[in-house]
Structure formats: C-alpha cells, structure tokens
Image (cartoon, rainbow, N blue to C red):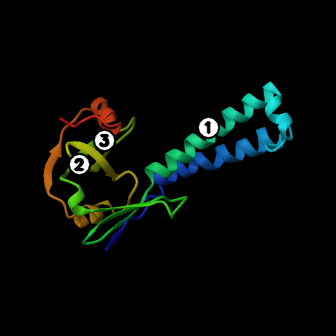
Amino acid sequence: MTRGKYKLFGGFGLTLLLNVPIGFFIYKVIINGPKIQLINIETWINNENFWMVIISLGIQILFLLLFMTQNKYLILDDYGITFVNPLLPFFQKTRKWDYYSEYRRVIEHSQYNTHEAIWLIKDNKLKNRISSFYYQNYKDIKKGIKIEYSGRLRINPFKQLFVIFGMRIN
C-alpha cells in the first residue's frame, strides 16, 4: 500500500499558503473591521456591504476549492486508488484499476518550472491526474500504479488545459 505524501514546498504548501492569508484578510479587514455580521439581515440589504461580503466570500471559496481539488490525499493498493478530500475526508472516491484504460506520463509546464504528471485515462479522456508538484513520494506512487503504461504523452501546454477541462486527448 502506498500513501501520498504532500510536498510542503510544492503545490500543497502553495495552496495552503494562499488560503491562510486570504482567510485572515477576509476575517480581519472585511468581517471584523467594519463589524459586518453575516447573519444580520441589514448586511444583505445594505448594497455596499452586500457586494463586499459576496466578493470576499467568493474569493475565499475559490481558493478553498483550489485546495480541495488539487491536493487529494492518495491511497494506492493492489485493488485500486482512493482519492481523499483533505478538508472533508468523508468525501472520497475509490476507483478500481480496471476502471482506467491506460496511464501516461505528461510534462506539465508552469510559469517557472516543469513537473511530471501521471494522467489516468479512460475512453481517451483524462479522469485523474497525479503531479510531482504536489507529492514528494511521486516515484513510489508511480511504481504503485497497476494500469497499462502507454508511454509519454507529448502535448502542448495550451491543449493540456483543454484536456484537464474535459476535452478528448486525441
């Protein structure tokens, strides 16, 4: 059994580092500063407070969703792979290895660096991805995958984005 170990100086640390100051800023400056009470009806009637609260909470929700979707805790065993939500661990998804048709290695590009990722593919569509940017034991995870390896996929960064959002690979 292999378990994913987060990289503190990688994707996990980065998204955590983004969420903490944004949450602190929203609490201190917007909620606690002008003494806005989220439960009070006057907060929602006052147009100035309403938009400030909506935009602030929207930004916080966006960053929390980024954290929850990109930092899944992984558990790999002989039967399949389990993706556990880091904030809400009762939300987990388990897939048997035969659910996927293949896996491929992809080099993902960011503004400053490149990272290798494993793309778990079914019916020529990306179903899950595991990036070396998020896991320090990425090589152990790669060894624990019990799916047919179909080689490295060479795909430009622009098309990678479309594939991540649901476009077919070929």
For the residue carrying disc 1, how many other residues have a C-alpha within 10 Å: few (<14), some (14-19), or many (20+)?
A: some
Could you say where residue 25 lies in the image, as x and y percent from the top left?
Answer: 71, 42
Could you say where residue 32 lies in the image, as x and y percent from the top left?
Answer: 82, 44
Q: Is residue 52 left or right of residue 72?
A: right
Q: Which residue is mark 1?
A: 59
Residues at circles 1 and 3 in contact by the CB criterion of under 8 Å: no
Q: Which residue is mark 2?
A: 121
Name the residue type under label 1.
Ile
Q: Nearer the viewer, mark 1 or mark 2?
A: 2
Name the residue type under label 2.
Ile
Q: Nearer the viewer, mark 2 or mark 3?
A: 2
Q: Is residue 10 visible?
A: no
Circle on res. 108: 3
Q: Secondary structure at mark 2?
A: strand
Mark with earlier residue (2, 3): 3
For the residue carrying disc 2, how many other residues have a C-alpha within 10 Å: few (<14), some (14-19), or many (20+)?
A: many
Q: In the image, what residue occupies the spot 13% across and 50% down? A: 150
- Count of picture labels: 3
Name the residue type under label 3.
Glu
Q: Secondary structure at mark 1?
A: helix
